[in-house]
Image (tube, rainbow, N blue to C red):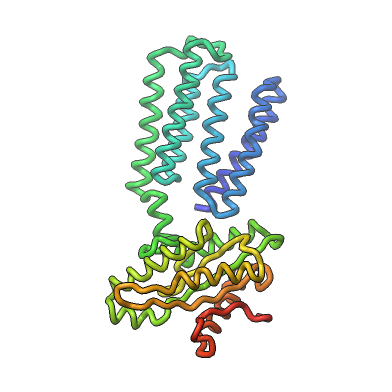
Amino acid sequence: MTSIVRVSVIVVTLALFVGSTFHAMIGQRDLAILFALATPLGISAWGYSRAGHNEAALVLLCVVMVTLVTMVLILSPLGVHDVVITAYGGIVAFSSLLLSRKRFYALAAFTMVAGSTAFLLDLNGLTRSRIGALSTWPGFPEFLVIVTIFAVVGRYSAERLMGSLEDLQRVSSGDPVTGLANRAGFLRSAGARLKAIGQQSNAVLVLVDVDAFRRMNAVIGHRAGDGVLKEVATRMQQVSGEHLAARIGDDEFAVLAAGAGEGADAEAFARSIHRTLQFDYSGVSVRTSVGYARFPRDATGIDSLLLAADGSLTRAKDHENEASRFAGPADRI
């Protein structure tokens, strides 16, 4: 998925740059400026992808393309009839294969509104078209029908033959019990986030282990055990907010908080998670051990940061720390 998004961003950004250059060479100054203004937005989509937000990058890319096509069709002397169907149909078909349902429906509606606006403006002589005879009122419902077919067929193919992007992401990167990211999804997203913020900013990785979870499963049953995991996930999300949370093992969770500060701030964030995850559920006292590590002070990559946090977690679970079950990073790793 990441490769598809990045290739798409690169291709579209280069196409925008080439389009700006081409229109400048043939004297279409307005169109050249329009393409030039759209090019940085393609670069912004690349930034979203680098940070692990692939769907946001695709949405931005598609919105830029729809807006650009609409403006080109209004400013171009070539009219809008056949070009509308080809351009908008292609964007809708592309988004139907890669976006989740909610975002695809929103983008399809936006595309219909934008295309209809361009078409109606041309029919009323409000564009620069010099071949208005090609744009007639019977062509408008034809445009709506054809673009709708693109959307329906593309979405049906995506969901029936490949499964929706939402389902694929849930299987490959999500935990089916808690709804959080799984280990693979966490490593991918956390690595991208650390790379995006660089070593000029701070982050803290908090690891949480549910104490005696196997014995808990034997006492209250696996279904209730799943309920404990869900409650842990819910409480973690309430404390962590927009930060990246995941279940990375059977009874182990992780939170990566970018910009959480250093020293006392990092420890305060980790302790807030630790306090929240001491609770009662179905008559069982749920207790957790927590360890944390700081980026870039304790490690400079997600793998080494996990090792540092795991060392803290191991110390938190030692008998000497049994009262608090909480530990920070050692002075040296």
In which image quadrant can residue 109 be found? top left
Residue 320 placement (x, y as % from top left): 53, 90
Q: Give me the residue at 36% from left, 26% from top.
A: 145
Of residue 206 and residue 152, the one placed in the foreground of this image is 206
Q: Give me the residue at 57% from left, 79% from top.
A: 327
Identify whether 304 is placed above or below 18.
below
Of residue 235 and residue 115, the one placed in the foreground of this image is 235
Image quadrant holding the C terminus, namely bottom right
Residue 196 placement (x, y as % from top left): 64, 56
Query: In this image, 263 relative to 158: left or right?
Result: right
Q: Give me the residue at 48% from left, 26% from top.
A: 114
Residue 295 placement (x, y as % from top left): 65, 68
Numbered disc total:
0
Q: Give me the residue at 45% from left, 22% from top.
A: 116
Residue 332 placement (x, y as % from top left): 68, 81
Q: Hey, which residue is sitting farthest bottom in the picture? A: 319
Query: In this image, 265 relative to 146: left or right?
Result: right
